[in-house]
Image (cartoon, helix red, strand yellow):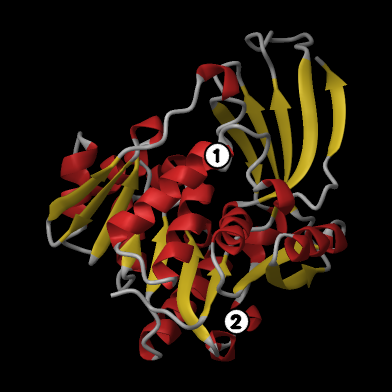
Amino acid sequence: MSATGGALLVVGDVVTDVVARHRTPLAPATDTAAEIRTLPGGAGANAACWAARSGGAEVRLLGRVGTDAAVWHERALRRAGVRPVLVRDPEAATATVIALVDASAERTFLTDGGAALRLSPGDWSAGLLEGVARLHLSGYLFFTAPSREVALRALRDARSAGVPVSVDPASAGFLAGLGPDRFLARAAGAETLLPNAGEARLLAGRSSPDTAAATLSRRFPLVVVTLGAGGSLVAEDGAVTARVPAPPVPPDRLVDSTGAGDAFTGAFLAARLAGATPAEAAEAGCRAGAEAVTRVGGRPEDGTGGEGRTGGTA
């Protein structure tokens, strides 16, 4: 069942993205020409911005940032229609990701978790769920001790309040380091799991996205696996129940795949809040993901706050 009539609360990462688009392969030990922009990002923050753009419900975001960029991030989130609840960390800088984007729009991340992964139990209160109809947790929270405790408390409090919870596993690389079984145990109780194909295969121990989705849906009531240009799969009760195609994107419009999964998540959750079925919500997510790959960065157009900085050479 979808929950309607309340807000979406996202608990997750707020990140400063340095996006470097290089048209030629990286040249080791020397220069590679690139177009470089510094933009607000983060899986949790990006999803919140796409949700705010996609639906009419209030969207809130709890995250932790350094004092170095707090005002910039707060301003960008508000301009995107998100109500930020940002804890300022006096010791750690804001999380930073360097996204290396090649000519095919595929991205590789270099990640410094910074303040984002220092979200602590003291930053969480069950009162944050007041007026909330859905809670979404970024999987990055599960990979370090302080933020993991926040995720577990938020999940517990939401379940006690009857608020459905969704989880985005976030990173196949970090999942492999933590171990799939540990992640699944910590995410137990979530209503919806939103992995990409690689994350689903790793978590389920299955080679195909279809089989992985079906397997995971025996643990979680609803599993939606994103397949990039292949669209998405919806699985419930141990079986794939819908296959949703992605709108085609002409090759000359492919710019940057950073945040495409976050766009899917945000639009999917907004649609569920509005009463859409899982398949209908997946269609909305696929449309947002197709739009996301046609622009630089992980936010919708109005989610940058108009404050990205450019540099480098083309």
Q: Residue 313, image x and y in percent?
A: 85, 16
Quadrant including the N terminus: bottom left
Q: In this picture, is 86 found above or below 29?
A: below
Residue behind mark 1: 291
Quadrant including the C terminus: top right
Of residue 28 and residue 72, the one placed in the foreground of this image is: 72
Q: In this picture, is 32 found above or below 253?
A: above
For image coordinates 82% across by 42% down, the residue present is 308
- Quarter of the rendering containing residue 152: bottom left
Left or right: 302 as drawn, with respect to 207: right
- Tell me which amino acid carries mark 1: Glu
Determine contact: label 1, label 2, CB under 8 Å.
no
Of residue 22 and residue 267, the one placed in the foreground of this image is: 267
Query: Does the image show residue 182?
Result: no
Q: Residue 73, image x and y in percent?
A: 79, 59
Residue behind mark 2: 124
For image coordinates 30% across by 45% down, the residue present is 200
How many numbered markers are drawn?
2
> Which of the marked residues, 1 or 2, is nearer the chain's N terminus?
2
Q: In this picture, is 102 found above or below 77?
A: above
For image coordinates 43% across by 50% down, the residue present is 285
For image coordinates 16% across by 50% down, the residue present is 240
Of residue 281 and residue 44, the one placed in the foreground of this image is: 281
- Tell me which amino acid carries mark 2: Trp
- Quarter of the rendering containing residue 107: top right
Left or right: 231 as drawn, with respect to 104: left
Q: Residue 32, image x and y in percent?
A: 75, 11
Q: Residue 262, image x and y in percent?
A: 52, 50
Judge the density around disc 1: few (<14), some (14-19), many (≥20) Cα neighbours within 10 Å: many
Left or right: 222 as drawn, with respect to 48: left
